[in-house]
Image (cartoon, rainbow, N blue to C red):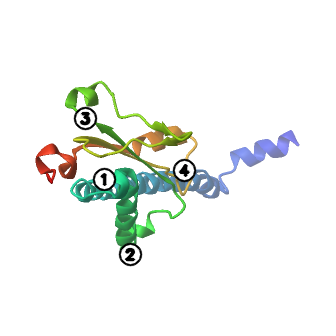
Amino acid sequence: MIKSLKQMLRQPQGVSTVEFTLTIGIFFTVVFIIFELSRFAVISAYWDLAVTESVRMVKNQRAPNNDYAALFEKTLLEQRRNLENGTIALLGEKRNSLKVDVKYADTVADLANENFRQPRIVKGQQVPPSGRNASLALYTLEYGYSPLIPLPFLPRSWTNHLLERKIVMVQEYERSQFQYQN
């Protein structure tokens, strides 16, 4: 047995087959990593555009019940539907989750100190803070990204944190200069 093993190691027959099997796995791994990182970059740019456009539209509108979070989410989903008709939709996934949040601040100092308006309790129910007369808003989007090809060295916590967007905007519709006086 040992003699036949030594003969096999000395003979050059099959060397190219062994080299091919060792390198093809590494080659495909590198190709998939490049594909996944490119996909991640395109999706990141896509959500940057969608969030910016949605915030631009929402800040100039009156929100029903002063709930800018619901209006932001609705506008963001419309942006998503519009862009899904293009070729960029081939890189995105339908099952990924969106988490939208809007926090309101009355002054720049409140925003800097993270003193946002807090939810109230009305008749035993927690009511989200109102965006009425709030001059500043912090819009937040978290996109639950899942790779097509799971990469063991790229933890999910890293990718999810990279696709979190926060934008501070002046609520044009809610600024005191723009309020209609009866």
- The residue that label 3 is drawn on is 106
Give the camera-side residue of 60 and 42.
60
- The residue that label 4 is drawn on is 26
Q: Residues within 10 Å of mark 4 (few under 14, many from 20)?
A: few
Q: Earlier in the sequence, mark 3 or mark 1?
A: 1
Residue at point 75% right, 48% down?
8
Q: Is disc 2 placed on a helix, strand or loop?
A: loop
Q: Does residue 174 appear left or right of residue 13 in this picture?
A: left
Q: What x and y, as percent, mark residue 178?
A: 13, 51
Indicate which label's residue lies in the foreground, 3 or 4: 3
Q: Earlier in the sequence, mark 3 or mark 2?
A: 2
- Is residue 154 visible from the viewing direction of this image? no
Please identify the quadrant where the N terminus is shown.
top right
Indicate which label's residue lies in the foreground, 1 or 4: 1
Label 3 close to label 4 by CB (< 8 Å): no
Question: Label 3, label 4: how many angstroms apart (C-alpha)?
Answer: 55 Å
Question: Label 1, label 2: how many angstroms apart (C-alpha)?
Answer: 18 Å
Instruction: Place residue 61 in its image quadrant.
Output: bottom left
Q: Residues within 10 Å of mark 2 (few under 14, many from 20)?
A: few
Q: What x and y, as percent, mark residue 16?
A: 60, 57
Specify the label residue 85 is tagged with.
Answer: 2
Q: How many marks?
A: 4
Instruction: Place residue 118 in its image quadrant.
Output: top left
